[in-house]
Image (cartoon, rainbow, N blue to C red):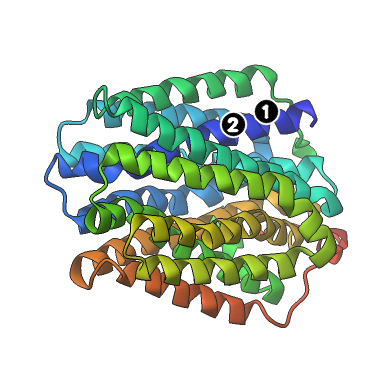
Amino acid sequence: MSRPLLIIFLTIFVNLVGFGIIIPLLPFYAETFGASPVVVGLLFAVFSLCQLAAAPVLGDLSDRHGRRPVLVFSLAGTVVSFVMLALAHTIVMLFAARIVDGLSGGNISTARAYVADITEPKDRARAYGLIGAAFGLGFILGPALSGVLSHVSITAPIWAAAAITLVATAMAWLWLPETVHRARAGVGNPFRYLPRLLERPLVRRVLVIDFMYWCAFAVFQTTFGLFVARRFGFDASRTGYFLAGFGLLGAVIQGALIRPIVRRLGDKPTFMLGVSCAAVGLVAAALAQSVVVFAVTLVPLAFGIGFGHPTMASLVSLVARGDEQGRVQGAASAVESLGRTVGPIWGNGSLQHVGDSAPYISAAALLLLTLLISIGFHVGDHASSQPQSAPAR
């Protein structure tokens, strides 16, 4: 692994450590302030809503001024948000912390564009597999830290996340080389080029798939804590340990299996296989009535995420020309943020008003629709070899 790819790997890893800490902790932390499940969903959603506004801007800035300064800014914003979260005394302060994190949270989309800068199209699935492994490892250490440190205090895991992210900020500042040459960088208002991107049928279709996929995943992710608390009586600590085990399985799948599977099947078939596995896992999880059965149902779901995350990112990169990776990745991040805005609100709202099985059943139905839309188109290396047209102004 090259040093730039290693630094990107570590950057995403620590970002997901912090996010992994928040997932099992936030529902229980918010409940200490009297939050309902719907409010918990809104806390997850407001972060993604702010990302929706900020990600295209950050993507465009990374094209014009380079990936490195945007990554450093994003990581520093995450540090500030964690400190605000740990010091919060009201629900309003919780929302303020999540807003700060969302507005500065462009590190994932920028990191994806960075990976596209330093890899050939044929190698991107493998590179994104390594990034996917960082996701998995982050979801091992993050929930595990949350489980262990929540015995100390409810805010101890948040302080740990702030410290880890501060280290990552320093690493990116000191060691990450730049890849973008400003002479080739895109210019223009990012909110003006988004409609133009959506005029391209292949880009539009992939972004719709991206939205639906992440919306379904956000339903599972943000309702997990309340689901296991209601059905199995889990607390923050047990939820953290359980998610750590799930993250371990996901890291193994994304780190070890994705390359041979993609080599044999290709990006899109692997993605469709992942979506199918995830839908089966969600339905089975919704029907599980014991902890053991529930744990077994998460295996196909882990395979679904392990196959789906890196190939979805690869499909997005392959519909972008070389000089617009930051823009297309910024647009994809915005679409994903919209999915992660709708998903938590729908998931937690249906859990509160319909029942604890409703979020997972509806997420599985959305994945099946995603599967249908994924049929009948091809994404190849042609996207990166098209003539370089002038950017929208």
The CA span between labels 2 and 1 is 6 Å
Residue 127 image point, x, y percent: 75, 44
Q: Secondary structure at mark 2?
A: helix
Q: Secondary structure at mark 1?
A: helix
Tell me which amino acid carries mark 2: Thr
Residue 2 image point, x, y percent: 80, 29
Is 177 on the left-hand or right-hand side of 295? right
Q: Quadrant of residue 19?
A: top left
Asked whether residue 393 is in view, the answer is: no
Q: Is residue 381 above or below residue 367?
A: above
Question: Residue visible at 26% across and 54% down?
Answer: 232
| Circle 1 residue | 7
Residue 129 image point, x, y percent: 70, 47
Question: Residue visible at 62% across and 24% down?
Answer: 172
Q: Badge 1, how many Cα within 10 Å: few under 14, some, many 20+?
A: some
Q: Is residue 16 above or below residue 325?
A: above
Q: Locate the C terminus by quadrant.
A: bottom right
Q: Locate the N terminus by quadrant.
A: top right
Tell me which amino acid carries mark 1: Ile
Question: Residue visible at 37% across and 47% down?
Answer: 47
Q: Are marks 2 and 1 in contact (CB under 8 Å)?
A: yes
| Circle 2 residue | 11
Question: Residue visible at 58% across and 36% down?
Answer: 12
Residue 133 image point, x, y percent: 63, 42
Residue sitting at the far left: 34
Q: Badge 2, how many Cα within 10 Å: few under 14, some, many 20+?
A: many
Is 301 on the left-hand or right-hand side of 309? left
